[in-house]
Amino acid sequence: EVQLVQSGAEVKKPGDSLKISCKGFGYSFTSYWIGWVRQMPGKGLEWMGIVYPGDSQTRNSPSFQGQVTISADKSISTAYLQWSSLEASDTAMYFCARTINHDVFDVWGQGTMVTVSP
Amino acid sequence: AIRMTQSPSSFSASTGDRVTITCRASQGIRSYLAWYQQKPGKAPKLLISATSTLQSAVPSRFSGSGSGTDFTLTISYLQSEDFATYYCQQYYSYPHSFGQGTKLEI
């Protein structure tokens, strides 16, 4: 079965660093791009960026450029989203999802809830 | 960046109704449009790609149409499991922006 399994919920303080993960199962991880989507509480979906695990190419949204880093480690079929200094406004659910031609997201992870509070 | 605007933002309907959700792009996106369904506490689910291509296992009561800047998602005969929030997404240019969502309520 094709699956993306994300790391568990996190509770952090402002200024903390964080790296969340998304591991692929049941398909060739290096053949698909992996994207990240933010959903703030009670709000809509926001496209953050994508990474190609085969060669670590990325495409990033200007809205998130410089705020987060998207990366992947093909040796362990895992993609990452990381922050160097969290803010309260980073509190949200973060989904990873795969896309074969950096277009639509056909398989989604279960989501990782990140809460940033003093 | 391309802005995607959905209407209505929320909508009340009954089972058996035919409903249409509209998505407008701020510039032409050809047919590079997808629709997703999201239920509370769950990840989104891809329903339609390339404006009108239904994904496998998606019921045929869902359909999509449009091109250029104006697109629609139609549910021909609402079932109880269809009450959810629907998002359009353009993938014509980066960032691949989503609409703000349409919440379909009973």
Image (spheres, coloured by chain):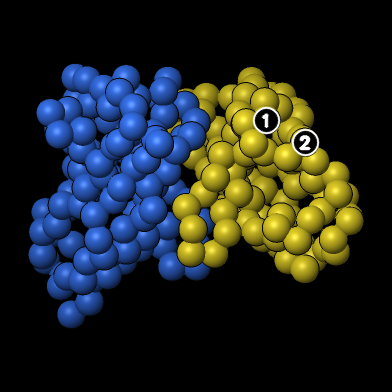
Chain colours: A blue, B yellow
Residue A34: x %, y % from top left = 33, 34
**Label 2: element kind:** loop
Chain to which mark 2 belongs: B
The image quarter containing residue B85 is bottom right
Residue A116 falls left or right of residue A103: left
Q: Contact (CB < 8 A) between labels 2 and 1? A: yes
Q: Check the image and report above or below for A110 versus A57.
A: below
Q: Residue at x 76, y 30 (%)?
A: B65
Q: Which residue: 10% across, 65% down? A: A16
Give the quarter of the image for residue B71.
Answer: top right
The residue drawn where x is 47% and y is 26% is A103
> For the view shown, which residue lies furthest in the front direction?
A1
Q: Residue B80: give x, y in percent of width and height.
A: 75, 61
| Precedes in sequence: disc 2 or disc 1 | 1
On the question of residue B51 being in view, the answer is no
Helix, strand or loop status at disc 1? strand
Front residue of this view, candidates B91 and B38: B38
Q: Label 1: how many residues lie within 10 Å, few (<14), some (14-19) or many (20+)?
A: some
Residue A43 showing in the rendered view: yes
Relative image position of residue A84 (x, y in whole percent): 11, 54
Q: Is residue B22 left or right of residue A21?
A: right
Residue B54's label in the rendered image is 1
Amino acid identity at mark 1: Leu
Res B60 label: 2
Q: Examine the rendered structure and indicate whether residue B25 appears above or below residue A18.
A: above
Residue A2 position in % (x across, y down) = 39, 35
Q: Residue at x 20, y 43 (%)?
A: A80
Quote the CA–CA distance across marks 2 and 1.
8 Å
What is the three-letter code of the residue carrying label 2? Ser
